[in-house]
Image: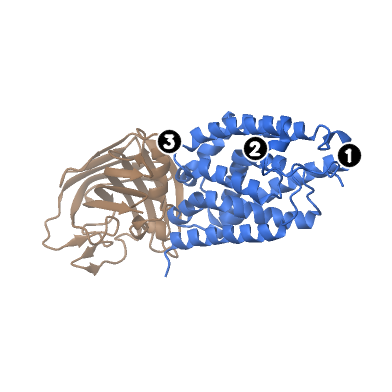
Chain colours: A brown, B blue
Amino acid sequence: MSVWRVAGSYLESCNCEAICPCRRIDGVMGGRSTYGICLGALSWRILEGHADGVKLDGLGVVLASRYSDDEEGSPWSFVLYLDDRADEAQREALEAIFTGRLAGSQVDHFPWAWKASHLLAVRPAAIEIEHVPGRGWFRAGRYVEVRVGHPVGSGETVTCVIPGHQRTGREVIAESLDVSDEAFEFSFRGNCGYESDFDYSG
Amino acid sequence: MLTRPLRVTVTLLTAALAGWVVAAQQMRGMDAGPGTNLGGLGWYLGIWVTMTAAMMLPSAAPMVLTYARVARDARTWVFVLGYLVAWTAFGLVAYGLYRLVARSSPGWVAWNRQGPYVAGAALALAGLYQLSPLKKACLRHCRGPFRYLVHGWRDGRTGAFRMGAEHGLLCVGCCWGLMLALFALGVMSLFWAAVVAAAIFAEKVLPRGLALARVLAVALVALGLLVALAPGHIPELTQPEPMRMGR
């Protein structure tokens, strides 16, 4: 039996042009991020989740990140936003899972867990997530807001490492990607995004 | 090949078993009941570490196992080392106190004078401690390893050692009363060591451990009264020779 599991829907957006070079297209690996520096925001809506008896159903997690392909090993800097409706035990479990400190399948999906990374902050935030297919959006307090404009209608199979290359998903165009925090300040229009689902356990 | 959790369990239980075997050999004929002479520091340290490993590793297994299984960056043996270091520190404090009392060699602690009352009072104190909020908090910690691992996480090798030592201190906080009871009953008695180890295991690992801690409180106070008033009626209690303590 697994000690913990989180499963639900996933949506992300970054400053790359669609289709994002970090995806696999028909199984073929992409390359360097479009502008050398990747700035993005990721979101997970947990539909079913538990960690050692603590229920995680219905909670949301958002992550804002930056990495540069020109830095040695392209280490990730990231801020983790945890649902402010979560109690202490739930927040601790979410932090341990989403930073990659807990052992489990998520480690193979989170570049910030398998690479060198800097966790800049963990913030409780009012997290709203509506992962409507093709029209999804999410918000983490006053820090992060992402809105999807429309899906990218390519006939190819596009997969992303964070939900997992074995899962189906869809490339989208983000109408807007806005992040405003001490560490990050960026705003993009019409860049790439990706929607899928996830199921991590350990 | 054994999986990691299984390997950890097997190693811990084997180490505990080896500890019991060595302790049984080393302590043969050493039991002099309450206030047993602890011998020189070197010998004492050796037997103390062996004994605590034997007594504590099975009940520490759930914490160690959760650590090994749940933490991606687990350094299990460093964690266990930190844990044993905390218990060794407790053993040294106990030894220091013993030496202090032994040096002044007060005649009144002799078994044929006030000795039974001292041992009985120590047992009663251990019993009362079972009911304290501190005991409850420490026992809750020991019974909820996952929460401690996500809450008290520290990175790296030093982090693993510190986490182990911290867990050890909380474990001492949980069990010092029961260990005091062991000193009162005869620290070199394999029988009492096994009874105390079983009690510790039961309250830490079995369901309803928190309730069991309160049952043990009553048992300890009752045993304390028995030792104080009718020490000759406890079958497994070795009667110390008069003036044995302090040589």
- Give me the C-alpha separation between circle 2 and circle 3: 31 Å
Residue wearing tag 3:
A88
Q: Amino acid at mark 1?
A: Ser
Q: Crowding at label 2, few (<14), some or many (≥20) Cα neighbours within 10 Å?
A: many
Quickly name the residue at label 1: B104
Q: Do the residues under discs 2 and 1 have CB atoms within 8 angstroms?
A: no
Dividing the picture into quarters, in which one does residue B127 lie? Answer: top right
Q: Is residue B85 above or below residue A166?
A: above
Checking the image for residue A185, the label placed there is none
Where residue A81 appears, as percent x and y from the top left, is 37, 41
Q: Nearer the viewer, residue B154 or A21?
A: B154
Q: Kindly state the secondary structure of the residue where label 2 is placed.
A: helix
The residue that mark 2 highlights is B177
Expressed as whole percent of the image width and height from the top left, the position of residue B82 reads 61, 53
Quick check: do tags 2 and 1 share a chain?
A: yes
State left or right for residue B1 relative to residue B231. left
Q: Residues within 10 Å of mark 1 (few under 14, many from 20)?
A: few
Q: Are marks 3 and 1 in contact (CB under 8 Å)?
A: no
Q: What subunit carries mark 3?
A: A
The label nearer to you, 2 versus 3, is 2
